[in-house]
Image (cartoon, rainbow, N blue to C red):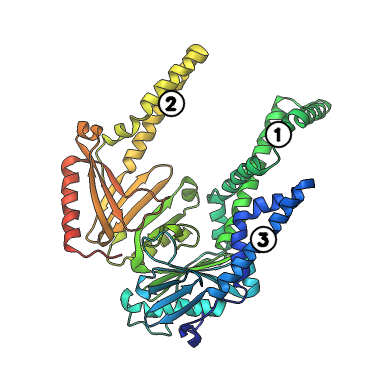
Amino acid sequence: MPPAAPDATAQDADRRLHPMSWLFVLAQQLKSFIVPLALMLLFGRGEGHMYQLWGLVGVGVLVALSLWQYFTYRYGIVDDALVVRSGRLERSLRVIPFARIHNVALQQTLLHRVFGVAEVRLESAGGQKPEAEMRVLKLGDALALEVLIRQRGRAVDGAAEESREAAPRPLLTLPLGELVRLGLISNRGMVVVAAAMAALSQFGPEDAVEDYLEKQAEQDLRVAAVWADNHHLGAADYAIGAAMVLLALIVLVRLLSIALALLQFHGFTLSERGRRLTVERGLLARWRTSVPRRRIQSWTLRESLLHRLFRRRSLDVDTAVSAHSQQQRALRELAPIATPDACDALVDHLLPKAGWTALAWRAVPDVAWWRLFLPSLPITLLLTALACWRFGYWGLLVLLWLPVAAFKARQLARRIGYALGEELVAVREGWWSRHWRFAEIDKLQALQLVRTPLDRHFGTATLKLDTAGAGTMAPPLRIRFLPEADARALYQRLAHALAQRPLHW
């Protein structure tokens, strides 16, 4: 999306959406009814023609509602607020101060790009839905509205000194090689395959799998056996064939993951303009979302085993925006993939006073490994009893999991640590898959000291930290297995800091 200067017409107090907006509203509504409508229109037979008629009536109603929304929707700029009017019989007037808008998201699907339009979502903190959702605006008007909101919000974001012509500064771009690495590291292809299989079982022909197993599978196996006999295949040949099939499936899934990474993150650019961050990405559908830096509530660095093989990490953030926006439109991935040095440099740039790379990490006591190992003990014993009941003495082989679980617990315990600076509190955990979770002290909203019966037995405690924004997929911000005295001292220190500082969110 090219940069655009503010359009004077964007200051009007009474503006319509794009004339084709009703078409996009209709498309969005049809998503909820596409399956029953398709079934009625395609599979109606005999008396079922009545269902086809009702399906056409339903489509007509949706078209009428979409047109009604276009003719009754108005928006405009009045002073330092966006005003949205909608409805005729039941009228709604919504005044949204620019200071309340935390995130501006622009979406362009392939159809949007054909018509030169974009969907705009304005989001705030704590809401269950966006403050305003405009389907759709002319691309120039959408960009002008984004610039206008940024300019009007400068005083709130502490960037009043920023000049109007200041150009965005690129912080991170992802070339093709990085996108290929992202596809190889991620499991997006497997997620799509699993979703397709679930959809097939849910909406596919009834008992399709059972019918295949009963009618076709036996015949296919017989043909395969005849072919193997004719070629004199042995056990080694079967093993090699099975390994090649498995390898081919893995390669196909990874290729699918690479394709999805290219579609989702092509042209990824993280840029900074004043104190606002903007991300643009997407091949067919383009996404553009921006948020003030001060709205970032917590940070997460991730490093899986595949990340370490490629010497890469990912950096995610949680922002104080509506819970409804925790999806691909929200600014969540600052660095989908980057080198560890690039991630650290990005954090140091965005949190210059936090001293991220200079934090002094502290480990938890060695007894933590026993706490991590303990849950696997009763489960392993129960599975051993069931295996012995079913297979006799061979079931005792299940006990071999205990030393593996103990080794895993020791490795996990060695990685657990925390750090507390003047501006930042951070936690690290994980072994195969590692993560670092941290937040500015000024962004903490609540502290909680938790002691379970096991904590009371071992003399430990857990300190839980809460911020305004927390993604559902983000690891918890907590410090586990602390000695009770250390936990209380840390709690008092943070509580004193929170009492002395204003909450920034």
- Report the residue marked by disc 3: 59
**What is the three-letter code of the residue carrying label 1?**
Gly
Q: Is residue 233 left or right of residue 276?
A: right
Numbered disc 3: secondary structure: helix
Tell us which disc is closer to us: 2 or 3. Answer: 3
Residue 460 x %, y %: 21, 38
Crowdedness near tag 2: few (<14), some (14–19) or many (≥20) residues, C-alpha within 10 Å: some
Snapshot quadrant of residue 422 = bottom left
Q: Earlier in the sequence, mark 1 or mark 2?
A: 1
Q: Residue furthest bottom?
A: 8
C-alpha separation, residue under disc 3 versus residue under disc 1: 51 Å
Numbered disc 2: secondary structure: helix
C-alpha separation, residue under disc 2 versus residue under disc 3: 58 Å
Tag 2–tag 3 contact (CB < 8 Å): no
Residue 326 x %, y %: 45, 57
Residue 408 x %, y %: 39, 34
Q: Do we see residue 360 in this rendering?
A: no
**What is the three-letter code of the residue carrying label 3?**
Val
Q: Residue at x 38, y 29 (%)?
A: 376
- Report the residue marked by disc 2: 401
Crowdedness near tag 3: few (<14), some (14–19) or many (≥20) residues, C-alpha within 10 Å: some
Q: Residue at x 35, y 48 (%)?
A: 476
Q: Residue furthest right?
A: 230
Tell us which disc is closer to us: 3 or 1. Answer: 3
Q: Earlier in the sequence, mark 3 or mark 1?
A: 3
Q: Identify the disc placed on residue 241.
A: 1
Task: Name the foreground residue: 240 vs 101.
Answer: 101
